[in-house]
């Protein structure tokens, strides 16, 4: 498979002005080129932003329900192409096919959900303190949005940003990860075929250091939404704070599952396997820490050791694959370095810990599912995001200590507790300092009809997705309107 991916500017697929290209390769077999991709420069970003600005007024004035109809058509196109798009995600990003299909389904769900929001973009009307006067607030778009998206959810996360931004009346310039450009192009293709007006959606490809930073700091951009690493997100904060430019950040996590002594251990085991090794640990919500009550620690460790040994590595498109590759060589080497650090710090390596090369894995970026036991809270593998198939087990004496361990890291995205005691779980959901809390479920599996976002270093600005406090809060500004129809000067908040 080798296809040509171009930029999308003003309703047309175009090459980069320089004519330069780069390759997107299959992480399960680096010999295979998935696509050759336009390598954008600053002049390409200028054109995309110019197109978005030119289209902004007409798109803002289009009635929101009409904008919703376009999103609905895009959702229908994605649904019809789900099987092909899922296979593309598995090939380009590497996650196993059921997860890849789920990635596409999230994009479909978000299209339908936000299409419906076109008839619900509500403000509020309140009474005035003066006669013959009314007061209301309305939502208005920012203008031109820059959207920066990562590689681990190559259709879902772009959809999480594109569809809310569009339904609110913004035009957009999307810069996807350079590791998954074909997936982003397929999403934009659906919007193109759904008759999105020229210039409303624009796509530029290229590295974040050059294209991304120039895009988000460009004077033609009104607001920015970013999902990616903490280092990159914190740099954007420093850059955009000086510009007073609205910014929403979704960054990393060091998520934990608490397993109490009264937990259903078989259920907890499934949650840890899914949370720790699903997507090869390459999720911001991955369960990289498991905090187990001392009464069941040894038993659960044995269960997890045996179960993780049965996980099958291979290409994401393989029908029997449980764990796919890391996305690229750089990420694989980063994870291997953390495994070395964990061993050096004194954690007990129970299984895994090496690059996998057998069974068709020799030309890809595979790491064995890795399990550390007897991990101490101060170790780097217990505090820093690894973003790979590495799970660290910590021991606790009770719920209070477990909650302190969860909260004692700089991140605060997702957490979970397994317990049959409703009072314990109530205390946990109250005291865990994370944006997402799961009861008797893993740390992954957010639903789009509620906000998605983290606390502390895991994110800032408004969360993603739907519900009150979700994406629509970020992709709009509030305008308050006072209308006085008394025909005389009335002074509000003045003692009469």
Image (tube, rainbow, N blue to C red):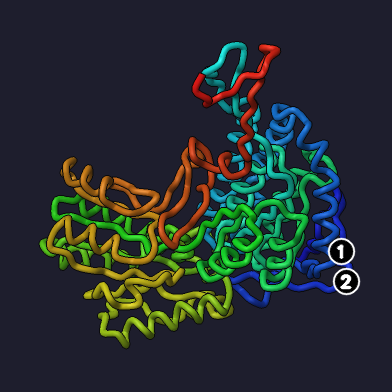
Q: Is residue 126 left or right of residue 69?
A: left
The residue sitting at the bottom extreme is: 344
Residues under numbered marks 2 and 1 in contact, where contact means CB atoms less than 8 Å apart: yes
Nearest the viewer among 298 and 150 is 150
Q: Which residue is mark 1?
A: 15
Q: Position of residue 294 (x, y in %)?
A: 13, 64
The local secondary structure at tag 2 comes to loop
Q: Residue at x 78, y 52 (%)?
A: 202
Q: Position of residue 171 (x, y in %)?
A: 75, 45
The local secondary structure at tag 1 comes to loop
Q: Residue at x 46, y 60 (%)?
A: 284
Nearest the viewer among 229 and 438 is 229
Q: Position of residue 226 (x, y in %)?
A: 59, 58
> How many other residues sit within 10 Å of disc 1, few (<14), some (14-19) or many (≥20)?
many
Q: Position of residue 324 (x, y in %)?
A: 50, 66
Quadrant in the picture for residue 318: bottom right
Query: Label 2, label 1: how many angstroms apart (C-alpha)?
Result: 6 Å
Quadrant in the picture for residue 335: bottom left
């Amino acid at each position: 498979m080798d296809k040509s991916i171009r930029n999308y500017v003003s309703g047309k697929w175009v090459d980069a002005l320089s004519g330069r290209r780069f390759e997107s390769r299959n992480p399960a077999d680096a010999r295979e080129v998935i696509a050759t991709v336009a390598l954008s420069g600053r002049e390409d970003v200028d054109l995309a932003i110019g197109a978005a600005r030119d289209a902004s007024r007409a798109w803002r004035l289009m009635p929101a329900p009409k904008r919703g109809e376009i999103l609905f058509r895009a959702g229908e196109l994605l649904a019809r192409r789900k099987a092909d798009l899922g296979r593309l995600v598995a090939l380009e990003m590497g996650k196993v096919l059921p997860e890849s299909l789920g990635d596409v389904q999230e994009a479909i769900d978000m299209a339908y959900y936000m299409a419906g929001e076109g008839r619900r973009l509500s403000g509020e009307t309140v009474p005035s303190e003066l006669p013959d006067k009314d007061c209301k607030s309305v939502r208005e778009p920012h203008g031109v949005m820059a959207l920066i998206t990562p590689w681990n959810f190559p259709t879902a996360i772009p959809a999480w940003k594109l569809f809310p931004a569009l339904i609110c009346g913004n035009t957009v310039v999307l810069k996807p990860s350079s590791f998954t450009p074909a997936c982003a192009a397929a999403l934009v293709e659906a919007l193109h075929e759904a008759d999105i007006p020229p210039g409303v959606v624009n796509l530029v490809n290229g590295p974040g250091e050059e294209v991304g930073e120039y895009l988000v700091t460009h004077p033609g951009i009104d607001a920015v939404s970013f999902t990616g690493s903490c280092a990159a997100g914190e740099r954007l904060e420093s850059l955009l704070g000086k510009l007073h430019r609205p910014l929403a950040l979704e960054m990393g996590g060091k998520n934990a599952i608490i397993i109490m002594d009264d937990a259903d251990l078989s259920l907890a085991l499934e949650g840890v396997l899914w949370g720790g090794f699903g997507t090869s640990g390459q999720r911001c919500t991955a369960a990289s820490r498991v905090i187990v009550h001392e009464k069941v620690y040894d038993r659960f460790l044995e269960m997890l050791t045996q179960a993780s040994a049965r996980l099958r590595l291979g290409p994401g498109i393989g029908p029997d694959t449980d764990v796919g590759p890391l996305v690229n060589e750089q990420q694989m080497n980063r994870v291997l370095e953390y495994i070395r650090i964990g061993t050096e710090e004194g954690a007990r390596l129970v299984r895994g810990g090496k690059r996998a090369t057998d069974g068709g894995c020799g030309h890809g970026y595979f790491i064995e599912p890795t399990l550390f036991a007897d991990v101490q809270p101060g170790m780097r593998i217990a505090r820093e995001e690894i973003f790979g198939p590495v799970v660290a087990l910590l021991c606790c004496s009770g719920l209070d200590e477990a909650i302190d361990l969860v909260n004692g890291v700089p991140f605060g995205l997702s957490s979970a507790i397994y317990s049959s005691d409703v009072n314990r779980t109530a205390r946990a959901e109250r005291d865990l300092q994370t944006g997402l809390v799961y009861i008797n479920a893993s740390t992954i599996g957010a639903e789009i009809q509620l906000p998605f976002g983290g606390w502390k270093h895991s994110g800032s600005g408004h969360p993603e997705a739907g519900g009150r406090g979700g994406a629509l809060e970020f992709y709009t500004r509030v305008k308050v309107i006072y209308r006085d129809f008394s025909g005389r000067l009335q002074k509000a908040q003045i003692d009469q």
